[in-house]
Image: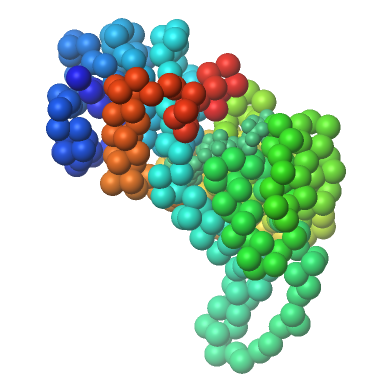
Amino acid sequence: MRITFCCTDTNAEPWLMGLRQALPQAQVELWVEGAAPADYAVVWAPPQRFVDEQTQLKAIFNIGAGVDALMKLQLPAGVPVVRLDDAGMSVQMAEYVCHEVIRHFREFDLYSAAAEAGQWSYRKPRRRDDFPVGVMGLGVLGQRVARALQSFEFAVHGWSRSPKSVPGVRTYAGPEGFLDFLRASRFLVCLLPLTPQTQGIMNHASLSQLQPGGYVINVARGAHLVDADLLALLDSGPLAGATLDVFRTEPLPADHPFWAHPRIHITPHTSARTLRDHSIAQIAGKIGQLADGVALASIAGVVDLPMGY
Ligand code: NDP
Ligand code: OXD
């Protein structure tokens, strides 16, 4: 069995070593132009040339949860794409989102500023009920985040494409449920895949529907957000702040207004990192299953190509 590895912006060597250890029967090689055809590919944002050349693939494994970079390519018909299914990311995402929700709700930035000024000053406690959280996307990561927020007794609302039942979460689905979902939310957490339907979904019209003092947390993809609309709503008043982990251009350009905005918190696409060991174990397990003839339908993380996620 041959496995080809083609991951942009990734230190290949430890992945190659890990895959070789996990699949000793396989020949695992870094892709170079003109390489021999492989049975399986392990990729992150490969070039079109890669898929054009690798014509005998039985499956493509993406070393991330989001497949938007792959969906921009002309993929060969009939070759399944398998994305990471959690692989240690959901707990990181839960930590990150809870941290940001609690930091804002408890006004910890103001306490830090007071401490820096040597002031011992109390703030009036805010009512948790006034800070309902809306989670857009109730998949692997969204549901984990919703569960974590519930443990801090926040009211959690969730929105997905198809109707979902998630214990303790008030759920909404499809375009018809979107307005009610937004109106029920003060925090808005984006955990949607980037598809033609979700591109630019956080814009002036949608963000204006959040409850007063709305707070945006984007941990999905930069293109979900219309940057200028967020800035306008922060500066004109209805939105209180935003935490952004993902951007239309990454790294975020030095002259982007987000950097200097006093109510925008920025992290460098780090809310849930791909954990190499977890990911290799998951991918190797699935390659083993496919090689043993296990049906694709029973493998978690197979992408619905027409849906784009
Ligand atoms: P899933 O595929 O498990 O979940 C996606 C959810 O979004 C599903 O609930 C789905 O609905 C919903 N959805 C999709 N399209 C629509 C739509 N048009 N309208 C409403 N809801 C929609 O993905 P994950 O939870 O694993 O990951 C989500 C995203 O998080 C990834 O695509 C990636 O971009 C991002 N990510 C970011 C990371 C970071 O470090 N910042 C790390 C990892 C992932 P339904 O349930 O009906 O299918
Ligand atoms: C992912 C990411 O999609 O890290 O996994 O953004």
The image quarter containing residue 227 is top right
Q: Would residue 267 be seen by someone viewing this image from the given angle?
A: no
- The residue located at (55%, 43%) in the rendering is 140
Pinpoint residue 20: horizontal percent, then vertical percent: 16, 34
Give the camera-side residue of 307 and 25.
25
User: Residue 250 occupies which quadrant of the picture?
Assistant: top left
Residue 216 x %, y %: 66, 51
Looking at the image, can residue 116 be seen?
Answer: yes
Whether residue 175 sits left or right of residue 71 in the image: it is right
For the point 34% across and 20% down, which residue is it? 293
Q: Is residue 234 above or below residue 159?
A: below
Nearer to me, 159 or 265: 159
Quadrant containing ligand 1 reads top right
**Residue occupying the point 20% across, 20% down:** 2
Q: Quadrant of the N terminus?
A: top left
Among the 4 quarters of the image, the one containing residue 211: bottom right
> Which quarter of the figure is the C terminus placed in?
top right
| Residue sitting at x 23%, y 22% | 4
Residue 244, horizontal then vertical, whole percent = 56, 50
Q: Is residue 127 left or right of residue 54?
A: right
Q: In the rendered view, would you say 31 is above or below 249?
A: above
The answer to whether 92 is drawn above or below residue 203 in the figure is below
| Of 113 and 58, the residue lying toward us | 58
Taking 287 as reference, is 121 left or right?
A: right
The structure's colour scheme is rainbow
Task: State the count of labels.
Answer: 0
Q: Is residue 59 left or right of residue 143?
A: left
**Percent position (x, y) of residue 192?**
61, 38
